[in-house]
Image (cartoon, helix red, strand yellow):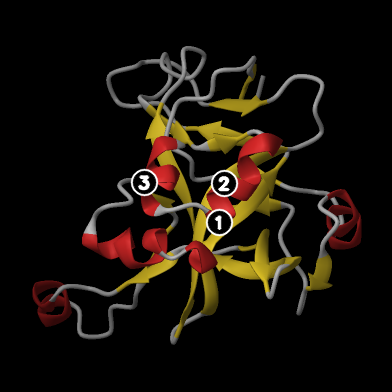
């Protein structure tokens, strides 16, 4: 799964690339882990805006968990594995709660069965790739976002059976404005070339 990605481009440069306004409130992380602070592109009043948000929707402990650990805190859910599931559906159905997540490259962690090392994945000869995302405002951490997931493409399958939804530029507007059915249609394995780099290699 995707629990780490890299995004080193300064917010101002990112805003120029996306022809977007800048609304960043503080420092963001270049190497993102769940619970970190990253950059997303969303639309506000017809304009694209680069914003900083907390990576992961808050998931509260169950009653059973709280009974065992009364001080347990919410955990960040950084991957949206099924847009029609109750946890995600309200955001997925509302285009205003969809966003673009710019990334240089991301890590796929191996499944227990794969027996292969973790690897960085990117798009050859392109400085950035764009993942489909959902966002909302939370009481716990302010604005939060999560990455939409789909089945893995051929290059990633040896490591894991899931990957982020990667959007081509021609699909950005559809993700940000389309119906829920259009959003679900975009939940496809990436069909273009993918670069692979073994972590630590």
- Asked whether the viewer can see residue 34, the reply is no
Q: Which picture quadrant has residue 184?
A: top left
Callout 3 crowding tier (Cα within 10 Å): few <14, some 14–19, many ≥20 = few
Q: Position of residue 190 (x, y in %)?
A: 53, 24
**Residue at 50%, 37% in the rendered image:** 165
Residue drawn 80% across and 49% down?
A: 8
Tell me if label 1 and label 3 are in contact, CB under 8 Å: no
In the picture shown, does residue 189 fall above or below 100?
above
Q: Nearer the viewer, residue 168 or 113?
A: 168
Q: What's the CA distance linking mark 3 and mark 2?
A: 11 Å
**Badge 1 vs badge 2, beta-carbon distance below 8 Å:** yes
Q: Quadrant of residue 27?
A: bottom right
Between 41 and 182, the one nearer to me in the picture: 182
Q: Quickly name the residue at label 1.
A: 177
Mark with earlier residue (3, 2): 2
- Residue at 34% over, 74% down: 74
**In what quadrant of the picture does the C terminus appear?**
top right
Residue density around tag 1, few if under 14, some if 14–19, many if 20 or more, within 10 Å: some
The residue singled out by tag 2 in the image is 174
Distance between mark 1 and mark 3 Cα atoms = 11 Å
Residue 71 coordinates in the image, percent (x, y): 28, 84
Residue 166 at x, y percent in the picture: 57, 35
- Dot 2 lies on which element? helix
Marks 1/2: CA distance?
A: 5 Å
The numbered disc on residue 17 is none
Q: Locate the N terminus by quadrant.
A: top left
Side (left or right) of 193 relative to 109: right
Left or right position of 78 against 128: left
Q: Residues within 10 Å of mark 2 (few under 14, many from 20)?
A: some
Q: Report which residue position mark 3 lands on.
A: 181
Badge 3 marks a residue whose secondary structure is helix
């Amino acid at each position: 799964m995707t629990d780490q990605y890299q995004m080193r481009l300064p917010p101002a440069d990112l805003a120029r690339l996306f022809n977007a306004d800048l609304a960043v409130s503080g420092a963001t992380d270049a190497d993102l882990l769940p619970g970190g602070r990253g950059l997303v592109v969303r639309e506000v009043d017809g304009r694209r805006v680069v914003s900083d948000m907390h990576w992961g929707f808050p998931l509260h402990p169950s009653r059973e968990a709280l009974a065992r650990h009364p001080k347990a805190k919410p955990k960040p859910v950084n991957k949206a594995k099924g847009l029609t599931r109750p946890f995600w559906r309200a955001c997925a159905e509302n285009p205003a709660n969809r966003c673009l997540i710019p990334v240089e490259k991301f890590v796929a962690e191996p499944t227990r069965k794969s027996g292969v090392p973790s690897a960085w994945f990117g798009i050859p000869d392109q400085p950035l790739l764009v993942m489909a995302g959902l966002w909302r405002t939370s009481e716990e951490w302010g604005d939060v976002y999560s990455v939409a997931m789909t089945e893995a493409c051929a290059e990633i399958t040896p490591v894991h059976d899931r990957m982020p939804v990667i959007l081509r530029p021609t699909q950005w507007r559809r993700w940000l404005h389309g119906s829920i059915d259009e959003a679900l249609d975009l939940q496809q394995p990436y069909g273009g070339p993918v670069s692979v780099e073994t972590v630590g290699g």
